Image (cartoon, rainbow, N blue to C red):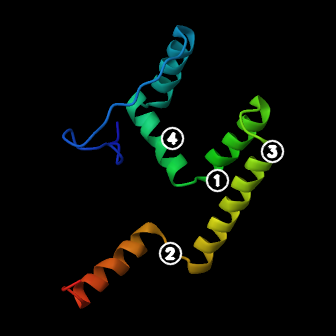
Amino acid sequence: MAKDPAQPRPDDRKKLMFWDSPKRQADLKIRLQLDGFTQSHFFRAMITGYLEKDEHITKYLDEYKEKHVTQGVQKRKQIVKGLKKYNETKKQFALNENEIEDIFDIIAEEFPEL
């Protein structure tokens, strides 16, 4: 099994917990085993996608909110509009996280006193 890149160091982690039905827990364990995930790895992957605004995850969540009426139409439209603007800005500057880190490294080399 591949190492989970999002796994925190043992001295730098917090426990996340929630409740669900025994049936859903059993179904989840079966699906995770079929897909080769541990529960921790799966949830860290989903959290990473959510925090990084992965378009597939945000689309699913928007559809879920609409279907289950967990958020008003106007608020959902605002969020979708904000995500589109975020993605356009990201494309406009064509920078990924590694490139941003490289920029900060270059600045640190040029101006060590900062």
Instruction: Name the residue located 41 percent from the left edge and 25 percent from the top edge.
Output: 17
Is there a contact, CB below 8 Å, between mark 3 and mark 2?
no
Q: Earlier in the sequence, mark 4 or mark 1?
A: 4
Q: Earlier in the sequence, mark 1 or mark 3?
A: 1
107 lies above or below 13: below
Residue at far bottom of view = 110
> Disc 4 residue type?
Met
The residue that label 4 is drawn on is: 46
What amino acid is at disc 2? Leu
Query: Between marks 1 and 2, how big is the CA–CA gap?
Result: 17 Å
Q: Earlier in the sequence, mark 3 or mark 2?
A: 3
Marks 1,3: beta carbons within 8 A: no
From the image, tell me which residue sits under label 3: 73
From the image, tell me which residue sits under label 2. 95
- The circle on residue 55 is 1
Amino acid type at mark 3? Val
Q: Residues within 10 Å of mark 4 (few under 14, many from 20)?
A: some
Around disc 3, counting alpha carbons within 10 Å, would you say few (fewer than 14), some (14 to 19), or many (20 or more)?
few
Neighbourhood count class around disc 1 (C-alpha, 10 Å): few under 14, some 14–19, many 20 upward = some
Q: Give the Cα distance between marks 3 and 4.
A: 24 Å
Q: Secondary structure at mark 1?
A: helix
Disc 2 residue crowd, few under 14, some 14–19, many 20+, Cα 10 Å: few
The residue depicted at 77 percent of the width and 32 percent of the height is: 69
Residue 7 location (% of width, % of height) = 32, 42
